[in-house]
Amino acid sequence: MNNNVLYDITTYDLKGLCTHFDIEELDILDFFNATALKGIQSNAESFLKYFKIDSARVLEKEIYLTSLHVTTVNDQLDSIKKFGLVNLQQAVTLETPLQKYLLNKGVSIDIKRKVIVYNGKIIDIGKRFTSVYDNLDWVIFKLFKDYPITSFFTTDDATKYLGKVHERPEFLKNLSELLDAPDINDDWKEKNYCYVLKFQSHLSNFDCLSFGSVKSDDQELEKRIWIINKVLENQRYGYEETCFSHLKGHVSIPFRDIKTIYTLDEYKNAYHVK
């Protein structure tokens, strides 16, 4: 018996719930009708009560989640095929399009030594980060706090994200401002192409920040309750809010776990983005 359950939170898919709790989609539609007639919310609490599911069953099985990651590259994804989907620290040190681009711009970043070298000038990025005050703080924040892989659980349009990751790595904006070199931010767009990668990963690979009010990775039940809520919410109300997924810092995504590769137009067609 397969003990794995895949929840595709990026869509309105109910298969994860059906597999997890051995129910049919028609049963879930009956649940929606029953809650509507009673004037109560179609949420995890009412769902578990309706199907008489206890906490032990919620905690059963290995959970995998899908996410949508937006990236821009100029190598037809060759580096991702080689290294997988990597975090920012890896992206600026491994032989990736980003690392090569920065070297061509006279920029090298040494994560271990915590220095940036720009056209021979050494910039210390080793100070302890406390809060964002200036351009240097932003770069330190991106490289040492905000470096894990961030993607979308749900969004009505990934290109609406203010970081404009469909045009270039968000980090380039911060770096160009620190170095007073606007071309570092602008030139990337000319020779790179956007892809939206749909990947799957085990629940344990996601930071607790991904799950609303969950405060600790130890809150396994709460994380699963959040997932049930999100699936029901997507089905019932659509993507009412953008939900980001945050992988843990050490986690990368092997190429085999990238299940669908979309061009920007293919993504918009698949997800009915206007």
Image: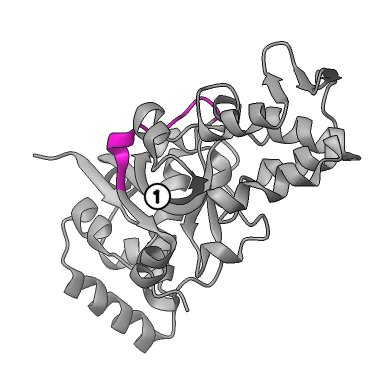
Where is residue 20 shown, x and y percent of the image?
23, 51
Specify the quadrant of the image occupied by residue 249: top right
Tag 1 residue: 197
The residue positioned 50% from the left and 37% from the top of the image is 247
The residue positioned 50% from the left and 48% from the top of the image is 71
Would residue 69 appear left or right of 170 to someone viewing this image? left
Per the rendered image, the range of residues in magenta is 249-259
Towards the viewer: 257 or 232: 257
Would residue 145 appear left or right of 132 to someone viewing this image? left
Magenta stretch encompasses residue 95: no
Where is residue 69 shown, x and y percent of the image?
47, 49
Q: Amino acid at mark 1?
A: Leu
Magenta stretch encompasses residue 251: yes
Where is residue 11 shown, x and y percent of the image?
36, 64
Towards the viewer: 42 or 19: 19
Would residue 174 appear left or right of 269 to someone viewing this image? right
